[in-house]
Image (cartoon, helix red, strand yellow):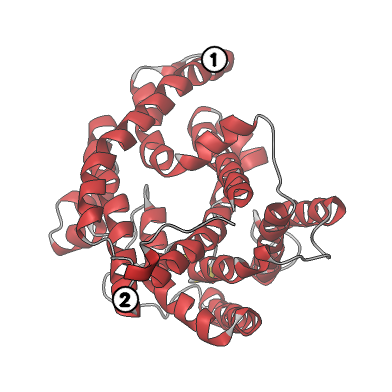
Amino acid sequence: MQDSRRTTSQIKGLAIVVVVFAHFSSLYAMDFYSRWFTEYASAIVAFFFVLSGYGIFFSLERGFEQAPSAWRASFSFAYRRLVRIYPLYWLALVTIPLFYMPDQAHYDAMYHSGFRSVLIWMGFPLIRNDELWFITAILQCYWVAPLIYVMMRRLGTMKSLVMVAAGLAGAFLVSAFFYLQEYSLLHLPYVEPSTVVFYRNFFLGNIVLFSTGMAIAPLSRRRTPLLANRPALALLAGATLLLLYSIRVPDKFFQHSELYLMPFLYIALVLFCLAAIVNRLSVPPFRAWKFLGDHSYTVYLFHYQLIWLLWNLGLSEMSLPWRVTIVLAVMPPFLLLCLGIEKGAAYPRKRLERLFRPRRPIEAEAPAIEA
């Protein structure tokens, strides 16, 4: 289990570096971004959904074993997730206007539009928040996670994978229906055809990826000969990168090619994550990637503020070598600041978590006797 945590943290660390690099380059090196890097950051977020589902499975497993009932376990899980997410999310929303001003319509929607602003601050499903859309998307996954886990316990791993595959097929059909109609049929109140609703133009693709990550968690405990080798890992890594490249530009191979290739990207990406965990993938420098992965949530929330702080200080007017040098120089103190923010938010969060921590059964409280 410890090895799988290290692997998932390292993959998350690599992914957050790609996301941050893409966002910096989109502002400070636009020619490079538009030619070589556009859309990769959005696609790479898929790793977070899969790996979050993988980790949440084990969290739910422990919670359901310790709680006296499924309802109590579900409530405790939801409470722990919310007290982890909301304080830092709200802090990020508060600090956004201090560093840059979104366009007026977006600013009004986030801060001045009454009920819509409340929905954004609560991370309500299907409500677009351009800067922090991932929070809304991952909250959707957390709310359905206990239901997915109960389904897996009752059906078993293989039947659950079949159910996820059926969900993937259904999502593809719905996506094709809306996508080919250019979302013209989506006219629900407060709902926008955004990446929250259609992750990578795939209907509720975030939940599809998240549930698949949960479904492969039990498989990581078993021996999987087809994936437990380095050639399979390399083949899946190559397939994932090729498909990422293929879907970054709409209609790259034929009309709507990115839509039809998306299910294959999901499958390749999930299998790569499973193969990486089974093979205990480690990427040097080990500790750096793991550190970034362990704190990727905070880095994601506050890297926008860093980008615009540097912009206000005149970084955009400097030459490209100076831009790169300054960004690299400010990254270590920025990461330390993120760590400090997490530490500051951890104390009240842990106190709140204790209020709803499920009690263990009496027989489980006795210390185990080692053989």
On screen, 244 above or below 14?
A: below
On screen, 14 above or below 44?
A: above
Characterize the local packing of mark 2: few (<14), some (14-19) or many (20 or more) Cα atoms within 10 angstroms.
some
- Residue 288, position as x, y percentages in the image: 57, 30
The furthest residue to the right: 231
Q: What amino acid is found at the position of numbered circle 1 in the picture?
A: Thr
Viewer-closest of 147 and 35: 147
Q: What amino acid is found at the position of numbered circle 2 in the picture?
A: Pro
- Residue 135 position by quadrant: bottom left
Side (left or right) of 73 relative to 367: left
Viewer-closest of 251 and 1: 1
Q: Which badge, 1 or 2, comes first in the chain's sequence?
A: 2
Quadrant for the C terminus, please: bottom right
Query: To which residue does mark 2 refer?
Result: 68
Side (left or right) of 160 relative to 121: right
Characterize the local packing of mark 1: few (<14), some (14-19) or many (20 or more) Cα atoms within 10 angstroms.
few
Which residue is found at the position 45% from the left and 61% from the top?
Answer: 59
Q: Residue 325 shows which numbered tag?
A: 1
Secondary structure beneath label 1: helix
On screen, 179 above or below 155?
A: above
- Residue 219, position as x, y percentages in the image: 67, 68
